[in-house]
Amino acid sequence: MLAVFPIALTFPVDALQVKVSPSTPHLGDTLSVVINLVNPTSSSNVKVASGENTYPAFEIAPNLYRAFIPTTPLEKPGTRSIQVKGDGKVENLSVLVRDRDFPVQRINLPPGKAGVDATEYELKRVAAFKALQTPQKYWSGPFIKPNAGPITTIYGVRRYYNGKFAKDYYHRGIDYAGAAGSPVVAPAAGRVALVGRVSQGFRIHGNVVGIDHGQGVTSIFMHLSRINVKVGDLVQPGELIGAVGSTGAATGPHLHWGLYVNGKSVDPVPWRYQEFR
């Protein structure tokens, strides 16, 4: 009779330690990839890749790095392959991103706002803002509500505009039904990196403020009636940045808050109820 002995699996003490959260992500979630370099021997040069995209990894503590991978409603659910490189080592892992039901909404824009296109100037300014990947991390802890009004439209809603389906569109943020003129505050610390006005050609966004929270995380606030900040201002959570309005492509007074991670719109709700390091 053969004796059976348990097998002890051992791993190199200097292997990469990688943790991905949340543990059960859905489309629209932000994947946080935390990498611990155990006994680093040289320059870290940490890199995180998924599919054809590479995401910046920032040092959040000694030998501890974090990268964000955004997911959106336009992507397919399923297994995502993530490759992490650091200190001459490679770690490959897979994460199952689950499907999520996104409702469909029908919007009828009033005369004068139906079929309005964004200006080239508007698009360039907003695109440059969303592409920011400032090394400094400004935010700390969960985000707060930017307006006290109730939420009327959640993230990820698909839409028909005046009876025509908006292909490749999803609602890139959350709408708050705050009263006209009600305060809009910063949900987290950051630097004001975008201020745009209807008078400058912001036809769709209306009067808009964008806050750079650092490390690829940005917030945009649209349709404002008033702007209380200027580019370069450093703001703290709860600091007044403007007031609710109906400028741009809006059917009535409300605040649109969009949260972007590495250039893609993610669901802001998880950022309000958990801390992303």
Image: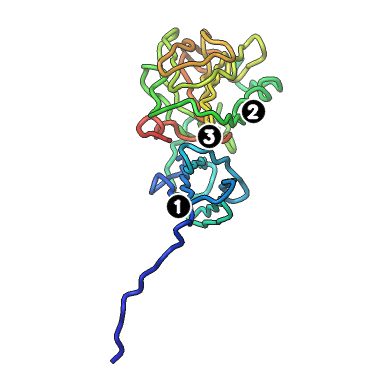
Task: State the image coordinates of residue 272 (x, y, percent, origin top left).
Answer: 38, 29
**Among the two numbered marks 2 and 3 on one chain, the one whose residue lies closer to the N terminus:** 2
Circle 2: residue type: Ala
Q: Label 1's element?
A: strand
Q: Which residue is found at the position 44% from the left and 17% from the top?
A: 236
**Among the two numbered marks 3 and 1 on one chain, the one whose residue lies closer to the N terminus:** 1
Distance between the Cα atoms at labels 2 and 1? 34 Å
- Say which of 251 and 88 sits in front: 88
Query: Which of the 4 image quarters holds residue 117?
Result: top right
Q: Are marks 2 and 3 in contact (CB under 8 Å)?
A: no
- Outermost residue on the right side: it is 120
Task: State the image coordinates of residue 88 (x, y, percent, origin top left).
Answer: 58, 54
Q: Label 3's element?
A: strand
Task: State the image coordinates of residue 23 (x, y, percent, origin top left).
Answer: 38, 48
Circle 1: residue type: Gln
Estimate how packed mark 2 is, as few (under 14), some (14 to 19) or many (20 or more) residues with alpha carbons within 10 Å: few
Query: Split into 4 quadrants, where in the image is the C terminus?
Result: top left
Which residue is labeled 1 in the image? Answer: 17
Circle 3: residue type: Val
Which residue is labeled 3 in the image? Answer: 261
